[in-house]
Amino acid sequence: MKWLARRPRIVTEHMQAFSFTRRAMVLGGAQAGIAALLAGRMAWLSIAQNERYQLMAEDNRVQLQLIPPRRGWIVDRTGKPMAINRTDFRVDLIKDQLHDAPRVLAALQRLLMLPPEEMDRIREDLEKAAGFQPVPVAENIPYERYAAVSLRQLELPGVVPQQGYSRFYPDGAAVGHLAGYVGAASAKDYEAEKNPLLITPGFKIGKEGLEKVAEPLLRGKPGARRNEVTARGKLVRELATQPDVPGRTLRLTIDAGLQTYAARRLGDHSGSVVVMDLDKGQLLTMASMPAYDPNSFSDGISHAEWGMLSADDHLPLLNKTLQGLYPPGSTVKPMVALALLEAGIDPSQGVRCTGSYRLGSGLFHCHKRGGHGFVNMHSAIAQSCDIYFYAMSRTIGIDRIAASARMCGLGAEYPIPVASQRYGTVPDTAWKQRKYKSDWTVADTLNATIGQGYMLANPLQLAVMTARIASGRMLVPSLIPGRAPAAAPLPVPAESLDRVRAAMGAVVNGGGTAGRARLLLPGIEMAGKSGTAQVRRITRAERARGGKFGGEGVPWKYRDHALFVAFAPVVDPRYAVAVVIEHGIAGSGVAGPIARDCITWLYDPARAMKTLEELEDGWGGDIATRMASKAAAYRSAQAAPPPAPIAASAGPGAALERE
């Protein structure tokens, strides 16, 4: 079967040549395909992606740093600065770049001479900070300390010494609640905007007051600094720098001199002063004291100072002008008189004040225990007789009084650039039904007609009420200068306004309750109305026992509020003022003189300053001096050891004595 065996294949030269050619073509085609792919990729990278990779290469070579913009100034009506910028030296920490934190913090404490409380604040801020959030270490440091940190920067990773601008408020606490303050952006702020400027060391945004509300106007646009660096980040040279664009200036209607004077004149009282110009309703002063120093917040407030502010029962963190609500007391009686006149009450009609007014089984008292005798509308306002207003308001009802209150500006929100306002309460029959699901009573009317009970107002509203009565126009307060629309006249007959103004003039100049508020200026008289508002209900049993209920001798928080509203001059008024002193006891004796001195400053600053300087000598200095003394006393008290506990063996008699 050999013939079935496979015959050997004979390979010829032609067959070898053909096989080689075919393999060469396959291999060449594969090489050509790979070359085409490489060429295409190179073309894609060098042409289509040219800009992208050029930028990436530039980023590796060039380091870009944002330059925080200079913040716009806040100035008063004459251009006097209230919030400005000044050159400062600062040191920050970046958490993501921080290595060996204990060693770095110890070095910074030594170089910058930081107190222990500041180190506690820095450690706490570091724990809370996101990686992108700068943590301020020290601001406004002397150049020598700044230079010492800069020279050792390579040894201190995460430490960023900077030269820039810091916010400065020349008048300090006097403008605290008005201007507000700035601070470093929080992680929440960054998440809301995703703006890299917010994580730039040294950049700050408005946190309170006008600084916060006017942030878009005041911020400006950042500049950029370009530096050429090596692969290891070493600086080679500085490239072109794009300058920042400063924020715009915010001009206010406020008179900075009067603002500072009013804040100082409040002394150690807790309260507010508001002054309005009656031409266009412009606000000249919105002072609220005590207040915080915005420079402390802008520089990074210490734990000790924050603790002192938080623990103060005078609430220095509260803007009393807009957020403090108080029973307006007798300051609303001129407004109530307008309601009586509108309802047809004869102003010459009178009542006999015996010192009390009976309603059913209840007894409502006048501030003058022995009574005023016969009083009509004029003398009731001048002498602040409660009995007259009890009797007359009962005949017209609360709804007419509430309508007059709203017409005069109580219970209203005003379009001024502030973060928040509290509107108070103008009660009426419908309001009580909505809020308490109960009917209005005659007793409620008697309380409301003398500014007690449910009625509440803030100092700004009291100033507006006074301004509208004085001007006879529906003035709306403004804080930013501009072309305000003409205010419509009050829907009240001119003779009614004249009667009320004349009675308010008698309060100060005609033997009324506020003779101490009389202006000592030749040819200029001031009209006003004092008010004393109870902060707690006095029971019949307490009255029967006698004694002092809201004056000296009782704890501060139980004392009556002191209020005073006024306008000047009596003829052709130009200014309106409202003063509220928390727990000040007497409106005529405490709030009235403050209003008098603030109006005096507008006409004769030298005379007003002389009065103030004499008072401050007795108070222990100006605002800054007293705040420094208070802070020192607080720190000393915190550092003192706690008092030794009383031994348990002292017995029940000792415990009873302590109570």
Image: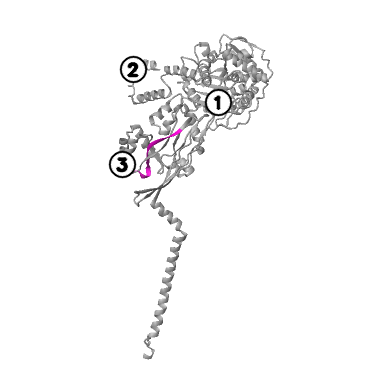
* Residue 278 figure quarter: top right
Q: Report the residue at 31% width, 36% height from top.
A: 111
- Residues drawn in magenta: 84-98
Q: Secondary structure at mark 1?
A: helix
The residue singled out by tag 3 in the image is 152
* Location of residue 404 with respect to 220 vertically, above or below: above
The kind of residue on which mark 3 rests is: Arg
Instruction: Tell us which disc is closer to us: 1 or 3.
Output: 3
Inter-mark Cα distance, 2 to 1: 54 Å
* Residue 67 figure quarter: top left
The residue singled out by tag 1 in the image is 460
The kind of residue on which mark 2 rests is: Ala
- Quadrant containing the N terminus is bottom left
Report the disc number at residue 599. none
Q: Secondary structure at mark 3?
A: loop
Q: Is residue 92 magenta?
A: yes
- Quadrant containing the C terminus is top left
Q: Report the front residue among 332 and 68.
A: 68
Report the disc number at residue 650. 2
Q: Position of residue 395 (x, y in %)?
A: 66, 17
Q: Position of residue 54 (x, y in %)?
A: 43, 56
The kind of residue on which mark 1 rests is: Leu
Dot placed on the residue nearer the N-terminal end, 2 or 1:
1
